[in-house]
Image (tube, grey):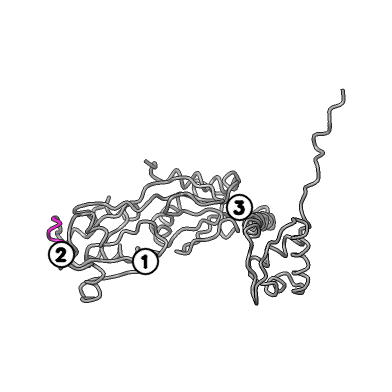
Amino acid sequence: MNEPDSSVRSPRRLPPLQALRAFEAAAAHGSFLRAARELSVTPSAISHQVRALEDTLGQPLFRRLTRQLALTPAGERLFEDLRQGFDALEAGVERLRRPAATQAVTLSTNTAFAARWVIPRMAAFRAACPGIELRLHASDTVVDLARGEADIAVRLGSGRWPGLAARALMPERYAPLCSPMLGLARVEDLPRHRLIHCDWQPQAHAPALWPRWFEAAGLAPPRGRSARQAAKEAPEAELSFSDETHAILAALGGHGVALLSLTLAAEELRSGALVQPFGPALDTGRYFLATANGREDEPAVRAVWDWIASQAQPAG
């Protein structure tokens, strides 16, 4: 008996790609004119393609207002699906454009994690993965993995990011750390020492700030004010840094007490260059590996993915 040819399938029931591109560009820009500039066509061509798409779907995608466009509920749903689809398509094509012999993987993470955790392990990485070039993208700005701005990211957060595969690495906690030369041992003596502050990004889930630490410790901020108020009123008494690496260096130099990552300052704690005189430690989330869905099985990405996981402490 002849078997049916399983390789034959029904054609995809999709509107013309040109109409979908026109709609996605117009929805992204909120303007036929700007969409026309992106696609190098006329605004009337964009309008015609969108109208044809609406006719095909049998429902409006835009509410055409004076000097602007507004998506209908159906338009919003279609735009989100098309945006993700075109992002994935763009990233896939870009990967094919790379030279086949190049095994380069871009790892994105914040500047402190890059300096304190990744760079000290680069020699170990080269020994473990000699055929892969690891390109480090250190920035406090979150990259778009779906668009291929990086291959892998190490992020601090919840691990629930739409469109991304995530793997837990290790929890992150922050505690008061200082040089042993300060002789600080009792929490009651903390007000006599300078506090070192470090800025956090606005989107941080649970930033480790001094006011939060004082609350967790059941203590009043110095002189009955918030730590930030104290810094404003007596700036010579406190230090503030935008980069945690600088805060670590200030603590190492004996310039005060800083709320620092127990992960990023682990080597200084092991050597005794820094000490944790008392608690509590604040939970700020967990480090995760992340990549665009499906990319975790690409050989080079998988090699870096597994290597980073092997270097991390077991997530518990």
Q: Amino acid at mark 3?
A: Gln
Specify whether residue 95 is in view. Answer: no
In depth, the one of 262 and 54 nearer the eye is: 54
Label 2: few (<14), some (14–19) or many (≥20) C-alpha neighbours in 10 Å: few
- The secondary element bearing badge 3 is classed as loop
User: Residue 290 placed where, x, y %?
Assistant: 51, 50
Q: CA distance from mark 2 to mark 3?
A: 53 Å
Residue 96: name its quadrant. Answer: bottom right
Q: CA distance from mark 3 to mark 1?
A: 31 Å
Residue at the disc numbered 1: 243
The disc label shown at residue 89, or none? none
- Picture quarter containing residue 233? bottom left
Residue 257's spot in the image, x, y percent? 22, 62
Under circle 2, the secondary element is: helix
**Quick check: 137 left or right of 87?**
left
The amino acid marked with disc number 1 is: Asp
Q: Is residue 307 above or below residue 95?
A: above
* Point 35% across, 56% down: residue: 206
The answer to which of 38 and 273 lies nearer the viewer is 38
Residue 103 spot, x, y in % from top left: 60, 52
Q: Which residue is mark 3?
A: 103
Residue 274 picture location, percent across and down: 24, 56
For the magenta stretch, what is the residue range? 186-192
> Residue 251 lies in magenta, yes or no?
no
- Name above or below for residue 91 compared with residue 228: above
